[in-house]
């Protein structure tokens, strides 16, 4: 998808196309649309990153709270967004055995109790073992917002670098 096509989108179409590059946060693409024309994909990513980092802590936490747990209730109920479903299945979250499910449930619960928002990690860049290890480690030392921007970059690339504009 050419950057000129992106720059020509109305805000309605821009939000339709990029509305879930940050999970359940269409406000973010709606906000950065006003920075057109974008130079390239990296420029869009930079604006999204800048917007998220400019939020007060409560806003950053809100963005994190829009993310479903990994191997959590939404996955079990089949109510994940398409993007999240793909990411979670790529990391093996859809095929956990009962011991692994229990371990994820327990770690996710501890994490939410400690921080007040869910554990967020880019599932496409991490294996099942990595996720469990990092979830245990980050219970001590958090770097959640950085993961949102990594997730967002991969989702954006999926849309812009493929020519399939099914959302428009
Ligand atoms: N909790 C969490 O990390 N969820 C996200 N991670 C990911 O790759 N997709 C998601 O929905």
Image (tube, rainbow, N blue to C red):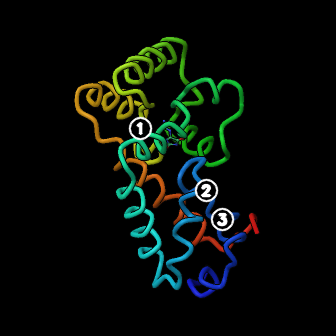
Residue 47 in picture, x, y percent from top left: 43, 69
Choose top left, top right, bottom left or bottom right for residue 142. top left
Choose top left, top right, bottom left or bottom right for residue 103. top left
Residue 146 in picture, x, y percent from top left: 34, 50
Relative to 78, 117 lies left or right:
left
Label 1–label 2 contact, CB within 8 A: no
Q: CA distance from mark 1 to mark 3?
A: 31 Å
Element at badge 3? Answer: helix
Q: CA distance from mark 2 to mark 3?
A: 6 Å
> Mark 1 — residue?
127
Element at badge 2? Answer: loop
Element at badge 1? Answer: loop
Dot 2 or dot 3: first in sequence order is 3
Relative to 9, 69 lies left or right:
left
> Mark 2 — residue?
26
Dot 1 or dot 2: first in sequence order is 2
Residue drawn at point x = 61 percent, y = 63 percent:
18
The N terminus appears in which quarter of the rendering?
bottom right
Residue 147 in picture, x, y percent from top left: 38, 47
Dot 1 or dot 3: first in sequence order is 3
């Amino acid at each position: 998808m050419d950057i000129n096509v992106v720059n020509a989108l109305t805000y309605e179409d821009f939000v339709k196309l990029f509305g879930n590059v940050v999970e359940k946060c269409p406000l973010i693409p709606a906000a950065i649309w006003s920075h057109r024309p974008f130079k390239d994909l990296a420029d869009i990513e930079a604006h999204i990153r800048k917007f998220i980092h400019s939020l007060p802590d409560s806003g950053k936490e809100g963005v994190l709270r829009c993310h479903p747990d990994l191997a959590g209730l939404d996955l079990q109920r089949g109510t994940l967004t398409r993007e999240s479903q793909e990411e979670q299945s790529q990391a093996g979250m859809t095929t956990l055995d009962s011991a692994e499910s229990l371990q994820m449930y327990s770690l996710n619960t501890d994490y939410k109790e400690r921080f007040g928002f869910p554990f967020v990690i880019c599932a496409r860049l991490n294996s099942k073992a990595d996720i469990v290890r990092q979830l245990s480690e980050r219970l001590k030392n958090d770097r959640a917002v950085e993961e949102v921007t990594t997730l967002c970059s991969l989702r954006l690339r999926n849309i812009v670098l493929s020519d399939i504009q099914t959302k428009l």
